[in-house]
Amino acid sequence: MQFLHPVYTITIIILIVYSFLEVYANEFKIYKSVWIVVLILILLAGFRKGVGADYPVYEQMYSFFPLNTNFGELFSKALFQNNNLEIEWFYLFFNNIFFLIGLPFFIFTLFVSIVAIVPKYYAMEKNVVFPATALMLYVIPAYFLSDSGQMRQGLAMGLCIFSFKYIKERNLLMFIIIMYFALGFHKTAAVFFPAYWLVRVKLNKTRIIAIVLFCMILSPFEIYNNLGFLNAIAPQEVYQGYSDYVNVQVEQTGAIKFLDLISLLYLFFILTFDEESCRRIPYYEYMRNLGLIGICIFFIMRGSPIFSTRLPAVYLAFAAFIIPNNLAIIQNTAYKKFLHIILVIFVIFYYFVFTQYQGASGRFTPNSYKSYLWN
């Protein structure tokens, strides 16, 4: 049995403890001390040394682009003009500035971690009754794969999730501004632009089931092969480890993707607690719609390891908003605690699945994790 490095394992255990405190409390309470855990997550990601499957590539980019590009090219890219830059302009803007003023790479990764992680937990604290539980659900695997791996997508995801504030306020201008910068961090942010309008679609259980079944039916047809523009927003640099660990081979049924099971778990919560959550949780229907979009995109793109993992990622992140809010509206204390235990078991199981398939290759294990804080 493999484990993540103790700093990660202890942090996850602390989040589980906070989750129990939230759910088992006699009244709803937001623990501001969870921000200490957020700080720990920032430091672990920011000061990591050679950790994350994409780390060597980003480290090479840090010195390559400042010496081979100029700010004119970046601003040209920002205006959507054609040039030879393959990396998003806003990421390179900060990358080049940090390098040119002589800062080491780990200071840049610390900056990236702050910008990527803080908006996510800020949004959780503002929109989720049990924010520590939301963070617990988010950390595995998104924190490791995005915030400590594919950093550009982690940055874009942070801004997309932060933009939920302006979706709620129906502030289209601010939403577009935030999304413009998110797109400047990573192309996959483009898939989140329709969110502003899709949150207003009226849904009920029957429509939700019908939509998901329709997307499942579309899955074998691999329609993404006829949508060439998808290659522009889901670039091929995704590392193979992600798609490796989401496939669980079952002899009787062939290849069952781990995300199949996770998506069905999310769907169970959405369907079971939809009406009550919509009545009692402000803007719950917005969060539900976004999570449902993620499930639908996953099933439509299921046959592509790249599209099925990159494109729905930001939408599926809202499952971490949906499920804790579902728990909060349950009146039956015993039932609430039972479902919470199931979620904790799910997180622990996910921990071991991730460690088995990604721990060593991502260098998150005790023998491989290194940090500038102590190495």
Image (cartoon, rainbow, N blue to C red):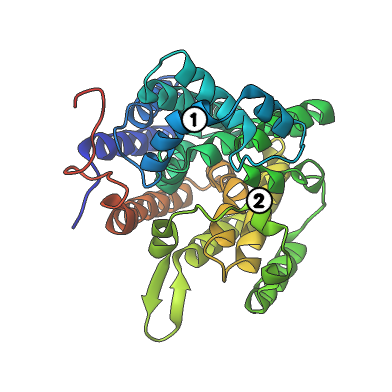
Q: Amino acid at mark 2?
A: Ile
Residue drawn at x 83%, y 27% is 173
Disc tally is 2
Question: Where residue 81 appears, x then y in whole percent?
Answer: 77, 37
Quarter where residue 25 is shown? top left
Q: Amino acid at mark 1?
A: Ile
Which residue reaches farthest top? Answer: 101
Quarter where residue 39 is shown? top left
Are there few (<14), some (14-19), or many (20+) residues within 10 Å of tag 2? Answer: some
Q: Is residue 102 above or below residue 344?
A: above
Residue drawn at x 31%, y 32% is 48
Residue drawn at x 49%, y 39% is 134
Question: Where residue 8 appears, x then y in whole percent?
Answer: 29, 37
Q: Is residue 336 above or below residue 266?
A: above
Mark with earlier residue (2, 1): 1
Q: Nearer the viewer, residue 56 or 129?
A: 56
Are there few (<14), some (14-19), or many (20+) residues within 10 Å of tag 1? Answer: many
